[in-house]
Amino acid sequence: MLSPEEWGIVALSLKVGGVAVLACLPLAFALAWLLARHRFPGRLLLDALVHLPLVLPPVVTGWLLLLAFGPLGPVGRWLNDWFGTTLMFRWTGAALAAAIMALPLMVRAMRLSIEGVDRRLEGAARTLGAGHWHAFWTISLPLALPGVLAALVLGFARSIGEFGATITFVSNIPGETRTLPLAIYSALQVPGGEAMVTRLALLSVALSLGALLVSEWLVRRTPAERLRRGD
Amino acid sequence: MAIEIDVEKRFGTRTIAACFTAESGLTALFGPSGAGKTSILNMVAGLLRPDRGHIRVGGRTLFGADVDLPPEARRIGYVFQDGRLFPHRRVKANLLYGYHLADPARRWMGFVEAVAFLGIEPLLGRWPQSLSGGEAQRVAIGRALLAGPEILLMDEPLSSLDAARRGDIMAVIERIRDELRLPILYVSHDRTEVDRLATEVVTLNG
């Protein structure tokens, strides 16, 4: 059904999306926890910054990444000096762009599930002898887990669909940074590319729909939701 | 074992203050809704920090001038108004949560003994959501006892129960008071409960 080239595109997209969400996960969870549980000066600003990639034109996000990670950018120079590596024009750069674009969605989903955890349950755990961290690992995290998994799925779907920031930051290099949407875009430019466009577009629809269904199913498994619906 | 409490806490313009000493037996904190009864229990448990004062149990200072033990170090059992069972763990895992965390030398009730004492053997495999109010309250009491507490706090444990279940749970509380001889601080706004259960009454005004 798919040509080897197209399988390569799918494999690259899954790799970029997978690395993006896994790398993003700890930061997204920490941000979601901070925003859900703590009041501190600058909280609104942090909230806005986290959401910025959601509303900023993706090409601007890509350009900002270029400024920061380019050979003359502060992070780019540091990566080159210390590790002799660069993210520009590499699939790792595509993963970074995808991670930043997925961050707001992931933080939102996790924050909702963290806010749904009854904090009084943590208090109950403390009176039973659980320290702060033990209560987190045994009570808060398991109760928020379906939301965390839903965030992973959503973030993964968003990462696979990333276009604007990716093409700006790491260009459109076959086999290195040409993920599904970039391949569709390229095929559209080529006479006779319609068949490939159709196949890749259908694949995108299937992946996105699947991710949304899985994510919704996971959210429904949160204890708060189960209680609300009286299961 | 004496429980000495002298605490004060401001909430905006309102101040909650209490100063009393409770001996063994069941001491009822009695007063209208909004008198701060639950807040006082929370301060004893370490879930709410008093602005000033001290809390001592059997000569051990839980809170004082430069002492503020975290809840997990206080060895205070707490039975909440709503049971507050962990919804993602079955009854057995709820019961054993504090038991496993307790220092074995401090435990004074075994799992089998507690299950028999409360008559909750048939519930062990159930999820908390599927329990009736009375069943949930028995499990909550068992969970608190199994953590090996030195005293027990109870916050209106009968308020969500119908009349028949109330009688059941009151009998359980009397047995904790008389057979296990565990000192209990008991919050209520119901005169009949207090008359039946309390060996001492502390009245709080709203």
Image (cartoon, rainbow, N blue to C red):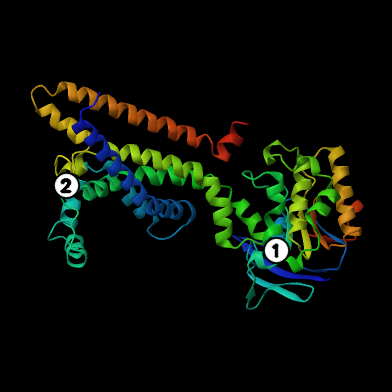
For residue A154, say whether it is visible: yes
| Residue kind at label 1, given as amino acid type | Ala
Label 2: which residue?
A170
What subunit carries mark 2?
A
Please say if the residues under marks 1 and 2 sit with CB atoms less than 8 Å apart: no
- On screen, residue B19 versus residue A156, left or right, reads right
Q: Kindly identify the residue that appears in the image at 44 percent across and 45 percent down.
A: A110
Could you tell me residue A62's position as x and y percent? 19, 47
Q: Kindly identify the residue that appears in the image at 42 percent across and 30 percent down.
A: A213
What subunit carries mark 1?
B
Q: Kindly identify the residue that appears in the image at 91 percent across and 58 percent down.
A: B179
Q: Nearer the viewer, residue B182 or A3?
A: A3
| Residue kind at label 2, given as amino acid type | Val
Label 1: which residue?
B102
Could you tell me residue A44's position as x and y percent? 38, 53
- On screen, residue A59 versus residue B178, left or right, reads left
Q: Kindly identify the residue that appears in the image at 23 percent across and 50 percent down.
A: A92
For residue A128, say whether it is visible: no
- On screen, residue A100 versus residue A43, left or right, reads left
Q: Nearer the viewer, residue A42 or A136?
A: A136
